[in-house]
């Protein structure tokens, strides 16, 4: 007997492609309706804060006699971890595209590059999730109105 594969069509949002600065060669694909980002945010924020502290301590404790190789390794490790947690947050390798030419610790508009990336992308999620929540509330209201109207309350009482 041959194995047959059947298709199930679901109306589930897929990832949307976003170009970076209008460059069609540089794009990321995100599901900005993914509410799982809220849980992931709770996981990664303490890690990010710890990495920033580690970096600032590293920079603050440098001197001319410091072993450059140890400094370079520590810096590289922090940058890699920032990339990993940022990619985890968005469930996509955003760093290869958004920070391909530099460090996550580069300064951009007075902020670290990772801060600029996260802030820009999170706002897209907030907009989508908020709009979807409004739709859900509207749909739920249609189903629950019959139980919350005054007529229904009078019949119960």
Image (spheres, grey):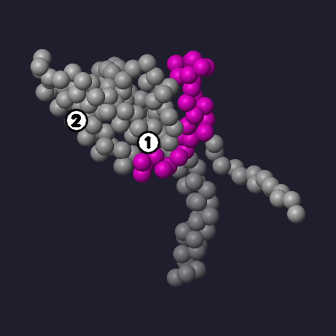
Q: Nearer the viewer, residue 39 or 70?
A: 70
Q: Nearer the viewer, residue 71 or 37?
A: 71
Q: Which residue sits at x=18%, y=23%?
A: 67
**Residue corresponding to mark 1:** 89
Identify the mark at residue 155; answer none if there is no mark. Answer: none
Q: Which residue sits at x=51%, y=38%?
A: 92
Based on the picture, tell me whether residue 16 belongs to the magenta stretch.
yes
Image position, residue 75 (x, y; %): 28, 28
Q: Nearer the viewer, residue 126 or 105?
A: 105
Based on the picture, tell me whether residue 22 belongs to the magenta stretch.
yes
Alpha-carbon distance for marks 1 and 2?
20 Å
Callout 1 secondary element: helix
Tag 1–tag 2 contact (CB < 8 Å): no
Q: Which residue sits at x=43%, y=18%?
A: 101
Image position, residue 140 (x, y; %): 58, 60
Left or right of 99: which side holds 144? right
Q: Residues within 10 Å of mark 1 (few under 14, many from 20)?
A: many
Image vertical order of residue 157 relative to residue 51, above or below = below
Callout 2 secondary element: helix
Q: Quadrant of residue 144?
A: bottom right
**Residue corresponding to mark 2:** 54
Q: Nearer the viewer, mark 1 or mark 2?
A: 2
* Magenta region, residue range: 15-40
Left or right of 146: which side holds 48? left
Left or right of 64: which side holds 132? right
Image vertical order of residue 157 relative to residue 139, above or below = below
Image position, residue 125 (x, y; %): 49, 40
Image position, residue 148 (x, y; %): 54, 68
């Amino acid at each position: 007997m041959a194995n047959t594969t059947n298709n199930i069509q679901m109306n589930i949002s897929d990832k949307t492609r976003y170009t970076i600065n209008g460059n069609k060669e540089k794009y990321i694909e995100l599901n900005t309706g993914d509410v799982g980002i809220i849980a992931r945010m709770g996981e990664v924020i303490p890690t990010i804060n710890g990495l920033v502290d580690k970096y600032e301590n590293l920079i603050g404790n440098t001197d001319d006699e410091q072993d450059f190789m140890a400094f370079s390794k520590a810096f590289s490790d922090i940058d890699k971890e920032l990339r990993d947690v940022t990619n985890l947050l968005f469930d996509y390798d955003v760093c290869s595209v958004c920070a391909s030419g530099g460090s996550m610790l580069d300064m951009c508009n007075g902020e670290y590059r990772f801060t600029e990336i996260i802030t820009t992308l999170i706002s897209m999620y907030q907009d989508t999730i908020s709009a979807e929540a409004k739709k859900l509330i509207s749909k739920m209201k249609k189903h629950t109105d019959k139980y919350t109207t005054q007529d229904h309350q009078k019949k119960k009482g």
